Amino acid sequence: MKSLEELRAIKAKMQSQVDVRVESEGATRVVVGMATCGIAAGARPVLSAFANGVAEKNLNVKVTQTGCIGLCQYEPIVEIMEPGKEKVTYGNMTAEKAAEVIDQHLVRGQIVTDYLVKL
Amino acid sequence: MYRSHVLICGGTGCTSSGSGEIEKALVSEIEKNGLVDEVKVVKTGCFGLCALGPIMIVYPEGSFYSMVKVEDIPEIVEEHLLKGRVVTRLLYNETVAEDEVKSLNDTNFYKKQHRVALRNCGVINPENIEEYIGRGGYEALGKVLTEMSQDDVIQTLLDSGLRGRGGGGFPTGLKWKLAKNLVKEGQKYVCCNADEGDPGAFMDRSILEGDPHVLIEAMAIAGYAIGANQGYVYVRAEYPIAVERLEIAIKQAREYGLLGNDIFGTGFSFDMGLRLGAGAFVCGEETALMTSIEGNRGEPRPRPPFPAEKGLFGKPTVLNNVETYANIPQIILNGPEWFASMGTEKSKGTKVFALGGKIKNTGLVEIPMGTTLREVVEEIGGGIPNGKKFKAAQTGGPSGGCIPAEHFDIPIDYDNLIGIGSMMGSGGLIVMDEDNCMVDIAKFFLEFTVDESCGKCTPCRVGTKRLYEILDKITKGQGTLEDIDKLEELCYYIKENSLCGLGQTAPNPVLSTLRYFRDEYVAHVVDKKCPAGVCKDLLSFEIVADKCKGCTACARVCPAGAISGAVKTPHVIDKDKCLKCGACIEKCKFGAIIKK
């Protein structure tokens, strides 16, 4: 290795991967419903879209999965929990919508009201 | 990008309880469910809770599965990895409370721990240099080479208060300063003592297995600080996993240009190699270790000259232990004040202990210096199994001593332990309960040092053998009060006259048990009794006639045919034939057999 830049480039590439394994405080959590109902409705591409998007943008966000929340008709459901804020629930998600939520909500902090679950 | 990471412990403990098969089953099950691109399986180093192995942690949830079996894998993959439902019944029970899954860091075992030397153990794949770099690895080396002078590095270590973790507790910064300044020019060496030989200590092994790059990075930093371009790791051949991972790590570091010529384009060059020890305990002593690296029989030599002046091949050498090195990159990155903020006045930072003996959570713990023995045993260690009472803890292995219950609340640091006649040593901590005989413990450690004495100097070679013989005599009930006085006198003689640390510390287990448990010695000698019921020659087995129902269970299990009696009448033990094996006691349902 001939320079510190090379080292930093490897670190930038790897950090988000190894950080998944450390319990950090103050991180936003994105929880994707991955029960049978969620998977049948197409939750896996949504989960992948969040995992990839968060890694690409190097956000301090943990993407996890959960079981059935009980609102099967709205699956795939995604919950976003930011420390100190109320939980936000999106429904009928797709990979495309996920990309928008990452840009609007996770990066800029603006809730995408069109996709919210309305009860 | 993987959404889930499954970490499987590949340390020695979990490997021997079958984590290899679990990994295979997991990989094939993940393939079957089409999750290969979504879930990553990582084999890591030790998580510390070896008693509950094989251990598996799933992130990002942080679910801690303990005692995993191959049969459990399909359920974990299908339920947890595919559907996101944590398999609660397989979780470490401390993490499950009132239907809620607690974070691992909230469990008693992990709550009081603070991981510095072990920070990457159980987090990264030790065979992948990029994961180490992702956790900030080699940044300290970069900082040292590009921003700091040799004296800056040494001053940082001096300010941090780091002391050697291998036993003696010598200030690391001072050692480096002497190696840099005593001889200014010429060839110098950096060595690492990975010849961990204390019975029951395995922290260095775990660092080598779980985070080998930290050692390479720290040794390169040492090389820069003292002006050396070559390093050697002296590691026991009995640590095959550690040796293999260290070899892989060195190869990768060379490929990435982090070992070799002109590191980071700064003109600094450093390379290193492994030297395998054949398992002689004495080779953990620094001069014997270097003699062994040179290719000679591992025997110590008198000091001075100290290695900082004349060490390996007669050249100035810095020799530190694995755990000491593992602290150094973090000290460079976080600053000496950060490190000095942990611990007590004269013992800074953290210390790794290998918990063993009569304790629930056998394993590896890293705690700030100054944590009390009570916290370690009762809270982190989960207490003593089967409701038994704490009697003493042995620290420092065969060179250390015991800490009795009266010092249960002593904050653990270098000076406190020496003050009460024990020592930190490498950090083995063996817990003993009321069923342990202290004379027998002392005899056990002496047997070890008699075996391991290299034989070069007479006080150690002959003296430890005589100590052992006296102890043996006492445990057989043939000792006299005069023997106890002789024992003590000989201990001091060996301590003062032995050539190296092995002999100088070998009598410590005897001296400290004499200091705190003299009454037990006296009981062996005067009453011819072993209060803990361990020393066989002083025991006798008897059947209480009132309690015996004459079921014949004991007579059938006795290997010596020493028990006789008719059915439904009380049995009798023939003391001449009895082997004192205790098989009858285990078999008796009525508690009719007693050991005295």
Image (spheres, coloured by chain):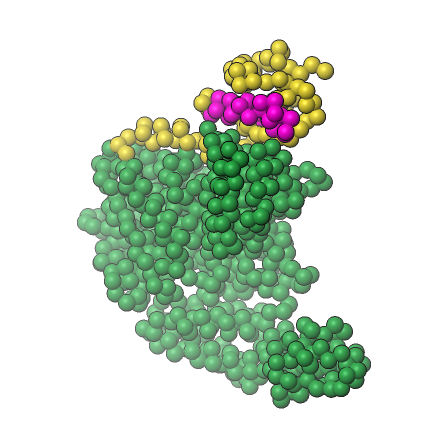
Which quadrant would residue B100 be assigned to in this image?
A: top right
Which chain identifier belongs to the green chain? B
Which secondary structure class fits the magenta region best?
A: helix
Q: Which residue occupies the foreground of this view, B211 or B75?
A: B75
Residue A45 placed where, x, y %? Answer: 53, 23
Q: Residue furthest top?
A: A114
Residue located 33% across and 61% down the image: B277
Quarter placement of the C terminus of chain B: bottom right
Residue B555 lies left or right of residue A45; in this view the side is right
Position of residue B332 relative to residue B397, above or below, is above
Residue A114 placed where, x, y %? Answer: 62, 10
Colour seen for chain A:
yellow
Residue B427 placed where, x, y %? Answer: 48, 56
Q: Which residues are magenta?
A: A27-55
Residue located 45% across and 65% down the image: B399
Which quadrant would residue B132 be assigned to in this image?
A: top left
Q: Which residue occupies the foreground of this view, B109 or B582?
A: B582
Residue B527 placed where, x, y %? Answer: 64, 83
